[in-house]
Image (cartoon, rainbow, N blue to C red):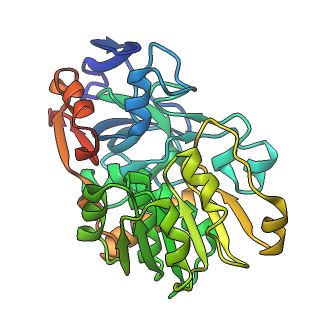
Amino acid sequence: MDAMGGQPTNRVVSLDRIGEFSKGTAAAVGAPGPGQAVVRVRRAGLCGTDFHAFRGRQPFVTYPRILGHELGVEVVDVGENALGVKPGDRCAVEPYLNCGICPPCLNGRTNCCVSLQVLGVHVDGGLQEWIELPAAKLHASSKLSFDELALVEPLSIGAHAVRRAQLKPDEFVLVIGCGPIGYATMAAACAAGARVWAMDVSDDRLHFCSARLPLARASKVEASEIAEMLKSEHLSAIFDATGNATSMTKAFDLVPSGGRLIFVGLVREDLTFNDPEFHRRELTLYASRNATADDFRQVMSWIESGRLKASALVTHRVAFDRLIDEFPSLLDQGGKVFKTLVEFPES
């Protein structure tokens, strides 16, 4: 917004249909009403949701759609609000738009609102220069960079899983899957004081995580060998962040008696387990979905205090103006791309 109250052109990148982006402009964002804010997007992270949407494998995306839910933004105008949000604030965006009146919302479980809408999935997201958002979904920090603010959302996914598991300091936990969500889970578990064992089938991903996190152990192990190795370990919880049905099913057999199994990854398949064994060991199974405002605040506190190094996630950067041209190469590199940040023009 300029000093006269007008708005510059809002350039957007839209995913018009599977495999086809276009550049364009969106309708002008007007003056925000009460409880709303107009923000300028400074950074946007790309994640598996965006790549799956491009390939047509994201079940909840409809087209055309402006992707982008991992955002670092600057507030440029704000309506009346009791939250202290003001122009100039640098913020992370909590991209989960909840109704506030359903039973989960009223019980503080905003992440599983019955009518939840996620930016960049159900409604247009942040691959545009300006966007209007609820002020309550903005988490300000005077200490964090726009890079770090854009990384709060993916790291909060791991923090929520760790909070679901109610980890205590010095617990020994296994995280299966060393992709970005597995990394976020390991980072949160380490920040919470747990000792973490990472496991994956990829040497590259194991190395990436072990080089950046204070892991107790990192192993590339075939599934048939895991159970034998676990006999000598005293684990209390296993997180599966693979999004792989085979891994998630086999994880039931690995959890020790009295232990917890936390599914952070999501798969569009039925999962089965042996009920007598489930009861004999009195296991606890948790699903972990998205994150809450508390998780955002926790992650931001960890980053600000130095307990969590957010920038270690980033492997690639792309200018907003070059995104359409370079997006296919990010897909082609597969596992070599861990986290890409889209950088928006300064003016």
Query: Camera-side residue: 340 or 239?
Result: 239
The x, y position of residue 151, in whole percent, is 34, 53
Which quarter of the rendering shows the N terminus?
top left
| Residue found at x 82% / y 73% | 280
| Residue found at x 33% / y 43% | 73
Which quarter of the rendering shows the C terminus?
top left
The x, y position of residue 134, in whole percent, is 52, 39
Left or right: where does residue 238 sit relative to residue 176?
right
Residue 27 can be seen in this image: no
Query: Camera-side residue: 252 or 212?
Result: 252
Query: Camera-side residue: 298 or 338?
Result: 338
The x, y position of residue 38, in whole percent, is 40, 34
Query: Camera-side residue: 249 or 105?
Result: 249
The x, y position of residue 69, in whole percent, is 42, 38
| Residue found at x 52% / y 84% | 233
* 189 versus 244 height, above or below: below
Left or right: where does residue 211 sit relative to residue 26?
left
